[in-house]
Amino acid sequence: MTALDGVLEATAQALSVRLESVFTSLGQLAEVSASILGTPGIQHSALEALKPVVDRVVAGQGGLVDSAGISVVPGVLADADAWHQWWSLVKGKLVFIPHNLNPASVNYYDYTDMTWFEQPLASGGPELIGPYIDFGGADMKVVTASLPVMQGSRALAVAGADLSMDGLERIFLKSLGRRQEDIALVTVTGKVVASNSARFAPGTRFEGGTPSKVSVPVTITGPANAPWQLVAAP
C-alpha cells in the first residue's frame, strides 16, 4: 500500500464512521416515528412529539446535520393527505420549518417527487442523495441522508437529515491533511461532494479521472453499493 492509498483509506474510514452515526440516529427517529404513525386515526399534530428526537439527531452530530425530520407517505394521516414534519437549526435553535403542501399552489412543495423520498422507499434501506439544490426547501446545496419508516411491510414515512456541506468538507480535509495530489469525494453519479482543489467544485461533475486514477470507496452499512468514493486525479 502506498502512502496515498493509506491516506485515502483513513479518510474513507473517517467519513464512514460519521455517516454511519447519522444513519444510526435516523434509525432511532424512524423507530419513534413508526410507533406514532402506526396508531390508527393519527393526526399530524402528534408528530410534534418527534422534536426531542430530532434535537438529538442534530445536536449529536457536531455540526454535520443542519436539519432533520420525517415526510409522511400520503394517506397515512387522518387529517392530512401529506405532511412534512421538519426542523432546521436557525441561529443555534431548532425551528419547525413550514412547507406549502397545497397541490393547487404555485409554491407547492411536493416532497413525494424528491429522490431522497422515493429512493429509500424503493430500496427499503438507507440512501445518500446529492449534492443538489433544495429549491423548494432551504434553497441551498445539500446532501440528504434518508431511510424508510416502516410498520412491518407497510411504508409510513421517510426519515431524513440534511448534511452540512461545510461539515462534510471539514471531516474530509481534516483526515486528508495536506496533499500534493488533487483528491475529490465523488458520488456514484459523479458529483463532487468535497475536494482539496479548486479544480473540483462541490456540486459539479467530476471530470478529472482517467483509467489510472486511484479510488477508495466510502462504505456504509445498508446500501448495496458504496454511494461515495475518494478519487485522486492525475
Image: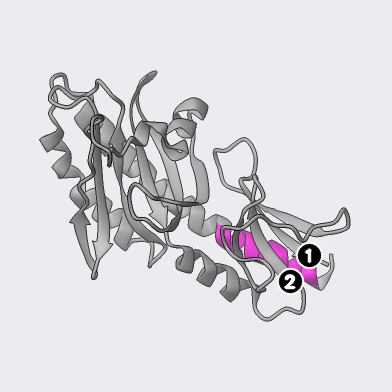
Picture residue at 62% right of the left edge, 35% below the top: 224
Residue at the far right in the pictured view: 212
Q: What residue is rendered at 24% in x and 52% in y?
A: 87
Q: Is residue 10 magenta?
A: yes
Q: Is residue 80 left or right of residue 147?
A: left
Left or right side of 194 for 101? left
Q: Amino acid at mark 1?
A: Ala
* Quadrant of the image occupied by residue 152: top left
Name the one closer to the observer, 104 or 67: 104
Q: Which mark is residue 182?
A: 2
Residue stretch in magenta: 4-15
Answer above or below: position of 96 versus 147. below
Q: Label 2, label 1: how many angstroms apart (C-alpha)?
A: 6 Å
Dot 2: few (<14), some (14–19), or many (≥20) neighbours within 10 Å? some
Relative placement, left or right, of 13 versus 64 is: right
Q: Which quadrant would the C terminus be assigned to in this image?
A: bottom right
Report the residue at 17% width, 27% height from top. Answer: 80
Image position of 68 with respect to 182: above or below: above
Name the secondary structure under disc 2. strand
Count of picture labels:
2
Q: What type is the residue that disc 2 sits on?
A: Asp
Is there a contact, CB below 8 Å, between mark 2 and mark 1?
A: yes
Q: Position of residue 184 (x, y in %)?
A: 67, 64
Judging by the rendered image, the residue that carries numbered circle 1 is: 233
Q: Position of residue 161 (x, y in %)?
A: 38, 50
